[in-house]
Amino acid sequence: MFVDLTPEQHALRLKVRDYFQNLMTPELRSELRGKEGGDLYRQTIRQMGRDGWLAVGWPKEHGGQGYAATEQLIFFEEANIAGAPLPFVTISTVGPALMENGSALQKEKFLPGIAAGEIIFAIGYSEPDAGSDLAVLKTTARPEGDHFVVNGNKLWTSGAEAADYIWLAARTDPERPRHKGVSILILDTQLPGFSTTVIPTCSNPTAATYYDNVKVPADMLVGELHGGWKLITAQLNHERLGLGSWSDKVAGLFRRVYLWAKSADEQGRKAIDKAWVRSALAECYARLEAMRLINFRIAADLERGQMDVALASTTKVYGAESVIEILRKLSEIVGANGLLREGSAASLLQGELEYEVRASVTLTFGGGTNEIQRELIAQFGLGMPRTVR
């Protein structure tokens, strides 16, 4: 079966591609690689917001363009291929959660700023003793008058050092069953008692965040008190879809390696003349196309108002593992020069391949480990018993 876009969707792709080709110069792309904060990052996000190319899938009344899921997927594909900085968590998970569960005050306070690129969130879920089993989280938010008093610490809060707010999961009733005593709060990173420490990694840096008697206004509770677990699961499903679509980031890189393999070196030799190189490129292409089909299947489901937990986890597992395998094969094709960092005289493709290899290591556990995702696929997709721990 041949699956194609409509003429209008093809036209949108060309429009988005043209926009990002003008915005993301090679110099800007290089400077922003691996960045989730800083003046240049924020300037670029704000420019995209001013141009109307940020919250494209949001309703127009909230600052978006009202695009359906398929059109939004086209936008993300082109943005990722161009290397544009996208605050994905803020735009695609926090924003929609606020539209569905936020109060009128919260919608008015946050949605216009997010769409304009002025407000960025980080997700405060994981803790030193609560990662895959998030329901055992220990950070507390004690109701006290017109605010909550938050104490505890979070780990792997990526982007926290540059975020304006933390989308925080905290235990508001320690006496309730572990899934039923959790709430979601919006915590301003400028509040007294909040601090963060950057954690360098071989991939992008992440952060630990600390909460020492932080007073969060009661009107920053999202949804129902003690009802945060359903918000967490919905947000993570959207995040997993985004992690699965990381394949878009390597689609452009695949194209550049393919063109390099077709070009002749000083002695007239071409890498693509080798059978194993052609075979490896073919497998990379097949994986990328399969991932695109899965993404478009999910977009079609979302347009029908459906969110399949098993499919979201499938997307995350297949996408993450495919990206790692594609990068491994591309590295083999390019050879040692592809593993040199940007700035080295002998680096190939401006160090982009080397960077993506490092950045990909978090994909198998970001948004929930692939082992946990396989359990969800078995439970929700195949009807198998829930794993007992």
Image: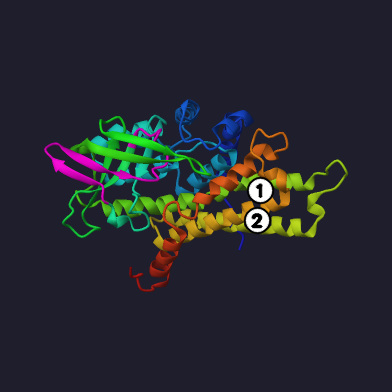
What secondary structure is found at the residue carrying circle 2? helix
Cβ atoms under marks 2 and 1 closer than 8 Å: yes
Instruction: Name the spot of residue 31 as percent of width and height, x first.
Output: 57, 30
Q: From the viewer's side, name the closer residue of 7 and 241.
A: 241
Instruction: Name the spot of residue 174 as percent of width and height, x first.
Output: 18, 54
Q: From the viewer's side, name the closer residue of 96 and 159.
A: 159
Please state if 275 lies on the left or on the right of 205 as rendered: right
Instruction: Name the spot of residue 266 as percent of width and height, x first.
Output: 86, 40
Image quadrant containing the C terminus = bottom left
Other residues around mark 1 within 10 Å, as few (<14) / some (14–19) / many (≥20): many
- Quarter of the rendering containing residue 151: top left
For label 1, the residue is 254
Task: Calculate the distance from the C-alpha at mark 2 to the C-alpha at mark 1.
Answer: 8 Å
Q: Is residue 174 magenta?
A: no
For label 2, the residue is 284
- Is residue 135 something one can see in this rendering? yes
What secondary structure is found at the residue carrying circle 1? helix
Q: Where is 240 relative to 109, above or below?
A: below
Q: In the image as oriented, which residue stretches furthest toward the left? A: 145
First to last magenta residue range: 138-165
Residue at x-position 47% and y-position 53%: 299
